[in-house]
Each structure stands twice: as C-alpha cells, then as structure tokens.
Image: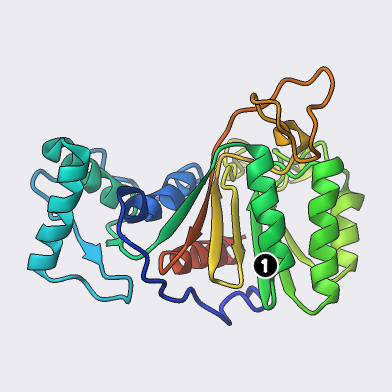
C-alpha cells in the first residue's frame, strides 16, 4: 500500500534562527508515536555520556565545533547545562537515535481556537496534498468543517489522506467517513474494533493518539488537540466561532505549527504508519 502523493513533495529547508524548541521539535512526534504499539523496546535510560547528534537541516551532521557552539548557546539560554544535556540525550533516545534537527520555526498554539484557525488556513492553501492523523474525529460542527474543507480541496485536485483511531472515533457514524471516501479521500481506520475478528493477537489498547497534520510537505501541526467541538473554546472564553458555547467549559490543550526540515520526519512518520495499517 502507498500513500497517494504523500512523498511527492518533501519539506524544504527554511533557515530560521535556532531555539531550544526548534531543536527539540523532532521529539514531539516520537513522543506521540510512543503511544502506538511497537515491538521495539526503548532504552529506559540513555547511555551515560552518549553524544548528542545534531543535523544541520540539510541531512548532514554539524561539525564538532558548530555543535559545541550550538549547545553552548542553548546552555546559556537555559542556565542549566547538565540538565539540558541530559534532556537532549533522552530526546534523542526517544527519537530512535535520530539526530536533533536545526533550522525549524515553531508557533505555539495555546488552545483549540488558535489551533483550528491555523489548521484551516493551512489546509485552504494546500496545492498538492494533505495528510491528517487524529485519535478523535467527531461528527460535530468542528468535525464537519474539517470534512468540508478536505472534500473541497480534494475536488480541487489536492490528494487527501486521513488516519483516525477506531476507539477514539467510535462515536462517529460510518457514514461520516463514507462521505469523505465518496469524494475521493483515502481513509484508514486504525486497529478497527470488530468483536467478530478478535483473536489472541488483537489488542484493544493498541491505540493511535497521534494528532498530526502535514500540508504539502512544508508545514506540520502536532500536539494534544483532536478534531472535536470539545476543543472549540478555551478557558479564556475564546472560541473558533467567536463565542463560548453555553454550558460548556473551555478545554485547555496545546498544539504546535512547524515549518522547516523536520517536517520531512513528520511526513515520513505518517507514511510509515499508513503502510503499517
């Protein structure tokens, strides 16, 4: 199985200034992936003194001198060199030993309204493909708005692929996803719940909690916000529609908008997960 169009365009290099968040962004994805079933054990503790590897953003490791300058700048910014290096080693171990990547630009999206606004804008600008992965995809105002945009972009010739978790989206009718399929959107249901097919190898707790959106291989979104009206308002009183829904408390969660070379890793993670299903 292949993901149509997903590998037709990769993340371009964007030479943005270095920051701690930009350096660690690759580990955000690996942390989400860790919730997926995986037979490969992770080392519980990185090897003492293990070298922190840093990718320039072009696929090449930085020189030893450059690495020392980068880590020195980060240590000066954080004010705790031993804690920082220990944390970086952990991040690299969680990320399967892949190097940390430079040259990324991050935007912190502090709640659902900010996240949905940024995601809608990115999807509307899509010209090649949209890859969307989520734990919860509800058939409500927010879910239907996502579906409407995805369908419209597919009608415009944009390739659209969607992965949703069977348990997380258990309350969403099959017809909701069939509507997208009929419009030409490719969908994958992660680890379908089917009592008739239960066997010793099936694990109900093998769930996909990843919330990932990649648009045209150049921008990625990842974090804790699902596709549901639950996230449409924030504790501050803001909402995606400009008002707080009566009787519903605002939900607090965080997402990231990412540009730069690390987007290619998010893209590859989506493709690998699609193929595995």
In the rendered image, the quadrant that contains the C terminus is bottom right
Question: Where residue 24 appears, x then y in whole percent?
Answer: 33, 51
| Residue 46, image quadrant | top left
Question: Where residue 271 appears, x then y in whole percent?
Answer: 56, 67
In the rendered image, the quadrant that contains the N terminus is bottom right
Applied colour scheme = rainbow
Decide if residue 139 is in sight here: no
Going 78% across and 53% down the picture, which residue do you hit?
146
Q: Check disc 1 and report the residue beneath it.
A: 130
Question: Where residue 42 appears, x then y in whole percent?
Answer: 32, 45
Question: Where residue 264 appears, x then y in whole percent?
Answer: 46, 69
Going 61% across and 72% down the picture, which residue do you hit?
216
Q: Which one is in front, 174 or 31? A: 31
Give the left or right position of residue 79, taking residue 219 as reference. Answer: left
Taking 189 as reference, is 56 above or below it?
A: below
Q: Which one is in front, 234 or 31? A: 234
Taking 255 as reference, is 268 above or below it?
A: below
| Residue 196, image quadrant | top right
């Amino acid at each position: 199985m292949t993901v149509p169009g997903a590998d037709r365009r990769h993340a371009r290099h964007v030479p943005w200034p270095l920051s701690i968040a930009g350096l660690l962004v690759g580990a955000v994805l690996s942390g989400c992936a860790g919730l997926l079933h995986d037979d490969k054990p992770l080392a519980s503790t990185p090897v003492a003194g293990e070298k922190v590897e840093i990718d320039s953003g072009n696929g090449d490791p930085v020189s030893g001198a450059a690495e020392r300058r980068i880590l020195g700048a980060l240590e000066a910014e954080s004010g705790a060199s031993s804690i920082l290096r220990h944390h970086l080693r952990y991040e690299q171990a969680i990320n399967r030993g892949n190097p940390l990547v430079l040259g990324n630009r991050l935007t912190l999206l502090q709640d659902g309204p900010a996240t949905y606004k940024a995601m809608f804008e990115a999807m509307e600008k899509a010209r090649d493909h949209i890859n969307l992965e989520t734990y919860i995809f509800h058939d409500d105002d927010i879910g239907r708005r996502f579906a409407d945009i995805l369908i419209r972009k597919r009608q415009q010739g944009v390739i659209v692929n969607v992965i949703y978790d069977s348990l997380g989206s258990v309350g969403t009718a099959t017809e909701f996803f069939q509507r997208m399929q009929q419009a030409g959107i490719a969908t994958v249901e992660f680890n379908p719940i089917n009592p008739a097919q239960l066997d010793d190898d099936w694990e109900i707790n093998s769930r996909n909690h990843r919330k990932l959106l990649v648009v045209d291989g150049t921008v990625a979104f990842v974090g804790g916000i699902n596709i549901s009206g639950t996230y449409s308002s924030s504790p501050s009183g803001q909402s995606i529609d400009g008002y707080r829904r009566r009787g519903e408390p605002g939900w607090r969660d965080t997402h990231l908008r990412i540009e730069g070379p690390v987007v290619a890793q998010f893209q590859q993670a989506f493709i690998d997960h699609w193929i595995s299903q």
